[in-house]
Image (cartoon, rainbow, N blue to C red):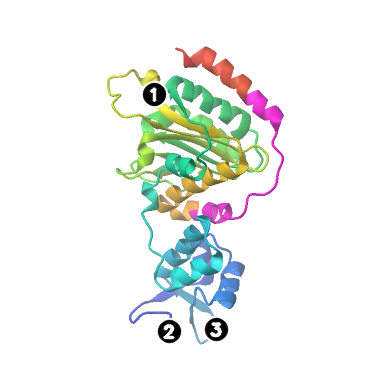
Amino acid sequence: MSTAFKSGEVATLTIGDLSERTGVTTATLRAWEQRHGFPLPQRLPSGHRRYAERDVERVLAVLRSRDAGTRLEVAVQTVAAGGGHHADDATRSVYADLRRGHPRLQTNRLRKGTLLALSWAIEDEFCAKAERAHLFGSFQRETYFNPAAERWAELGRVARSSFALADFAASDPDSRPVKVGLPDDAPMRREWAVVCESRDLPAALTAFELPGQADVPEKKRLFEAVWTVEPVAVRDAARACARVAAACTPAAAAPVLYELAEPVPEGVADLASVTAMFNRVVAYVDRYGAA
């Protein structure tokens, strides 16, 4: 038996199981084992690999570290040495991550009606038209998601992946979009986000609701918002959303998180689509935002 396993630890997962649970291909797992000695399996007399349950979290910890910018070999060494502990990703703030990583992005205070119009414009001009996009929507509450459920189901049909984050009673990895049930202490229960991660039409909008507005009419509540079409910033927003999703529904989100750990592919901004989005924003704000 491999010395990688602690006394009493049972190894029952095949390499295919580990791949399915983490989103890392079997070829990549074999390459990691050959190059870095990680993850180190138990070998059956037949030569087949078997892994323990903890290897799922260890591989995911490597992905999270790599996602944060650590070189793969350093991430592997840290996790293999037992240092792969991390804060609960379910309590991350996508708004805070984007502001911290891209401080030059301008913030604006917007009423909810205006924010809704901007979200619709991004959904219509980016989410609905992007090629094989990863889509994320943060709705705060299930009651806010329900009116948009049909709209997001349509967006999900043309997307590579789609996730809706809210205070759902439970996550549903089989729904489209995947429903991500946020825990009670999740900052994203106060946040609004629409993220379209794609090569041709990237866009991200994220905002948090300012406190102390319990008596303010719904559509007039103020949010501090930031939005961007810069590919690197959009990828970072998507990664942050995927990390929250992976903490709540790993089977559905881990493969997406792994894919988003790759460098941003080169592409050319579609300025015509950006202009179209601005035009649609103006139309939506004029029609709905001021109501």
Would you place residue 287 above or below residue 16 in this image? above
Type of residue at label 1?
A: Leu
Q: Label 2: which residue?
A: 3
In this rendering, position of residue 167 left or right of residue 134: left
Circle 3 SS class = loop
Observer able to see residue 88: yes
Observer able to see residue 175: no
Would you place residue 235 above or below residue 194 in this image? below
Quarter of the view holding residue 144: top left
**Marks 3 and 1: CB-CB under 8 Å?**
no
State which quarter of the image contains the N terminus: bottom left
Mark 1 is surrounded, within 10 Å at the Cα level, by few (under 14), some (14 to 19) or many (20 or more) other residues, namely many
Of 112 and 184, nearer the camera is 112
State how far apart marks 1 and 2 are (Cα).
57 Å
Q: Is residue 273 magenta?
A: yes
Type of residue at label 2?
A: Thr
Q: Is residue 128 magenta?
A: no
Type of residue at label 3?
A: Gly
Question: Which residue occupies 57% across, 25% down?
Answer: 121
In this rendering, position of residue 40 left or right of residue 267: left
Residue 219: horizontal and vertical position, in percent?
Answer: 40, 19
Please give the range of residues in magenta.
Answer: 254-277
Of 261 and 159, nearer the camera is 261
Residue 111: horizontal and vertical position, in percent?
Answer: 43, 21
State how far apart marks 3 and 1 are (Cα).
61 Å
Q: Which labelled disc corresponds to residue 222?
A: 1
Q: Which labelled disc corresponds to residue 47?
A: 3
